[in-house]
Image (cartoon, grey):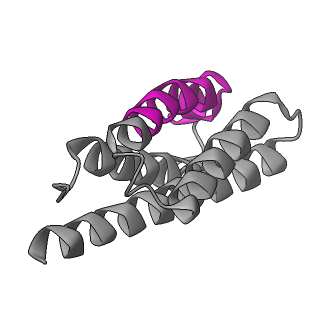
Amino acid sequence: MKEAPSWFDRGAIGVSILCMVHCLALPVLVVLFPFGIFAVLAENHWHWLFLALAAPVSLLAFLRTSPHVRSPIFAVGVALGIFLLAVGVWVDNHERQILFTVLGAISLLAAHVYNLRRLSTQADV
C-alpha cells in the first residue's frame, strides 16, 4: 500500500522551524533592540506553547503513518524530539532551555523530513 506524504508531517516541520527561529533569533533581537520590546518573547510560556503545538502534531503524523511502513528512525526522531522539547520546558537555566528546545526542534524537523521523503519515494514506486 502506498502512503501519501502527510500534512501533519508538513505541519510539524513548520512548527519546528518556528520554534528554532524563536529560540535562535530572540537573542539577536534583544541585542539589537535592548529596550525590552522583545522581553515578552523570552518568557517560559513560549516553550510550553511550542511543546503544546509540536507534540500533538508530531504524534498525529506518526500515528497516521501506517504501522507497516512506519520507520524506527522516524519513531526515535519523534520520541527524542518531544522528550527534548519537554526537557527544555522544565530546565531552569535559560541557555539550557534554548539548547534542549533547539535540539528537540531539530530532531522533530529531521524526523518529519525523513518521513516525508520516505513516503514520497514509496508513492512514486
Q: Nearer the viewer, residue 97 or 25?
A: 97
Residue 55 x %, y %: 52, 32
Range of residues picked out in magenta: 36-60
Q: Say if 47 sits above or below 9 in the image.
A: above
Residue depicted at x 13% and y 78% = 125
Q: Is residue 43 magenta?
A: yes
What residue lies at 63% left-to-right and 41% top-to-bottom? 82
**Residue 54 in view:** yes
Q: Is residue 35 magenta?
A: no
2 or 44, nearer to the observer: 2
Q: Quadrant of the N terminus?
A: bottom left
How many numbered tags mark residues here?
0
Residue 63 position within the rendered picture, expressed as x and y whole percent measured from the top left? 41, 36
**Magenta span dominant secondary structure:** helix
Residue at the far right in the pictured view: 92
x 37%, y 62%: residue: 115
**Looking at the image, residue 117 lies above or below residue 62:** below
x and y percent of residue 30 in the render? Answer: 59, 48
Does the image show residue 27?
no
Give the image location of residue 110, x and y in percent: 48, 65
